[in-house]
Image: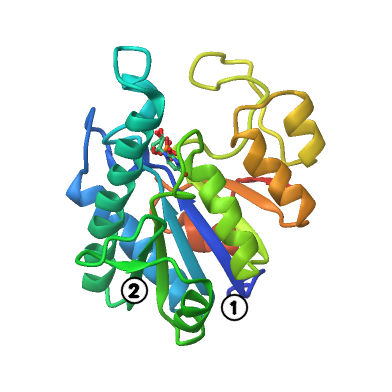
Amino acid sequence: MPDAPPRYKKILLKVSGEVLMGDQPFGIDTATLARTAEDIAEVVKTGVELSLVIGGGNIFRGVSLAGRGVERATSDYMGMLATVMNALALQGALEKAGVHTRVQSAIPMDAVCEPYIRRRAQRHLEKGRVVIFAAGVGAPFFTTDSGAALRAAEMGCEALFKGTSVDGVYTADPKKDAGAKRYDTLSYTDVLAKDLKVMDASAVSLMRDNKIPIVVFSIRERGNFLKVLRGEGVYTTIA
Ligand code: UDP
């Protein structure tokens, strides 16, 4: 049987920072980083135009310092800097896997990467480069989920893939509740009304307004990104 073709031609993949930790409690596990890059390279080889947004939770989360004497906005800026570190790490691993990449940061950092320029990012994608969007939306009180939703809409992506450590959206936390059931499909309104912790509400509502489906899947299994893109395997679609 020939492999099914990818279901979309232009997508954005959001990878949570936690994925890069592997089994470590903190930071970047280099084996996991390399494996994730190979999975992404496999998808790029199919000719799909791919944008990436990477979180920072493996290094720093704004809320962790907020309320402990550090202003929320200040600690959120620190969180955004963490996403830039992850973006650079992922860029290095992707280039090693033979993928051409550019990092664009929502907070300009001339000596480190390009600033975010929408039309320039589009051009990179047309040339087959992967664009890694760093620093979320560039503003505190947001998360990289919102950054992912915003860039997916701006780039005109057909779907937003959310690669996490769980293989979809469940009725309850499957790590805590053995009876939790996975949804195959959900509506945006279900996610918001049931307050399911998939992505923040602002990200979900932006995807709803722009009619961009969200595909939640596990990026921890080798080869799973391409499988899910072909419509195989286990995942939840929010549409
Ligand atoms: N952050 C922010 N604005 C953004 C994106 C991120 O303030 O647009 C900060 C926020 O403090 C957040 C941290 O960066 O906690 C890391 O991002 P996130 O928690 O989304 O990472 P993930 O959970 O995906 O690893």
The percent position of residue 66, horizontal first and vertical second, equals 36, 19
Q: Is residue 86 left or right of residue 237?
A: left
Q: Are marks 1 and 2 in contact (CB under 8 Å)?
A: no
Pointer 1 residue: 2
Residue 78, visible in the rendered structure: yes
| Secondary structure state at the residue bearing disc 2 | strand
* Name of the residue lying farthest toward the bottom: 127
Looking at the rendering, which quadrant does residue 103 occupy? bottom left
Q: Residue shown at 44%/79% (left/top)?
A: 45
The Cα–Cα distance between marks 1 and 2, rounded to whole angstroms, is 29 Å
Query: Given this view, does label 1 or label 2 mark the residue nearer the observer?
Result: 2
Pointer 2 residue: 101
Looking at the rendering, which quadrant does residue 185 occupy? top right
Of residues 111 and 37, the one nearer the viewer is 111
The percent position of residue 8, horizontal first and vertical second, equals 65, 70
Rendered position, 191 above or below 161: above
Quadrant containing ligand 1 reads top left
Dot label at residue 96: none
Task: Identify residue type, mark 1.
Answer: Pro
Task: Identify residue type, mark 2.
Answer: Thr
Circle 2 crowding by C-alpha within 10 Å: few under 14, some 14–19, many from 20: many
Q: Residue shown at 27%/38% (left/top)?
A: 21
| Secondary structure state at the residue bearing disc 1 | loop
Looking at the rendering, which quadrant does residue 87 occupy? bottom left
Give whichever of discs 1 and 2 has the lower sequence position.
Answer: 1
The percent position of residue 58, horizontal first and vertical second, equals 30, 36
In which quadrant of the rendered image does the N terminus lie? bottom right
